[in-house]
Image (tube, helix red, strand yellow):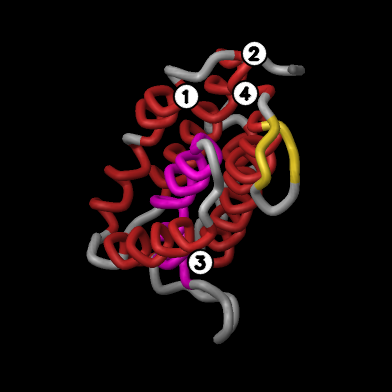
Amino acid sequence: MVLTKEELVSALQGEVRILNHLLSKAGPEHLAYRPSEKQRSTLELLQYLSVMPGIHLRAILTDRFDIEGWKNAWRSGLSEAGTKDFEGLKSTIALQEADLAELLGPCTDEDLRAEINMFGKSSRATAIIRLVVNHYVAYRMQLFLYLKAAGLDELNTLNLWRGSDTM
């Protein structure tokens, strides 16, 4: 395995930290922004981000991937996320650092190297990188672009990649 469990947890928690930093710049006035009619609004993007890591990670950590269970988890998760206001979504996302560490806590390196079949065969660790870490990176980039387009001109590369205003 290329990453240790601790490095994997640290990478995931780093993504949450950057996401929380971006959220600290946003306000309720930015939630309605939608680049085009058929794209998610900022609110819908945050709803997705509030449930994505847990749904993906729980599915990856099961002994056998159940597509129907996964679809049901998405329906249920997004439905619940749809009941939350901006502060509720921020609180949910803030808890992800601890949640991810807790979910991965029992995993051994052997567990992470084990082959799973979830949208194709890979190691469990590879699936975590592809479905959780990569989604964090992609969707925080989308959030960054939405916030800039919605008027937060002061956001810059450091906000996006370091989760800070300055070096």
Residue interval drawn in magenta: 41-62
Q: Earlier in the sequence, mark 2 or mark 3?
A: 2
Mark 4 and mark 2 lie on one chain; the one further toward the N terminus is: 2
Could you say whether the residue bearing mark 4 is in a helix, strand or loop?
helix
Discs 4, 2 touching: Cβ within 8 Å = no
Q: Quadrant of the N terminus?
A: top right
Q: Earlier in the sequence, mark 2 or mark 1?
A: 2
Q: Look at 51% across and 75% down and name the residue there.
A: 34
- Find the distance from the CA under tag 1 to the CA under tag 3: 36 Å
Q: Are marks 2 and 1 in contact (CB under 8 Å)?
A: no
State the residue at coordinates (50%, 39%).
Answer: 57
Dot 4 or dot 1, earlier in sequence: 1
The residue wearing badge 2 is 4
Residue type (three-letter) at the residue carrying disc 2: Thr
Mark 2: few/some/many CA within 10 Å (<14, 14-19, 20+)? few
The kind of residue on which mark 4 rests is: Leu
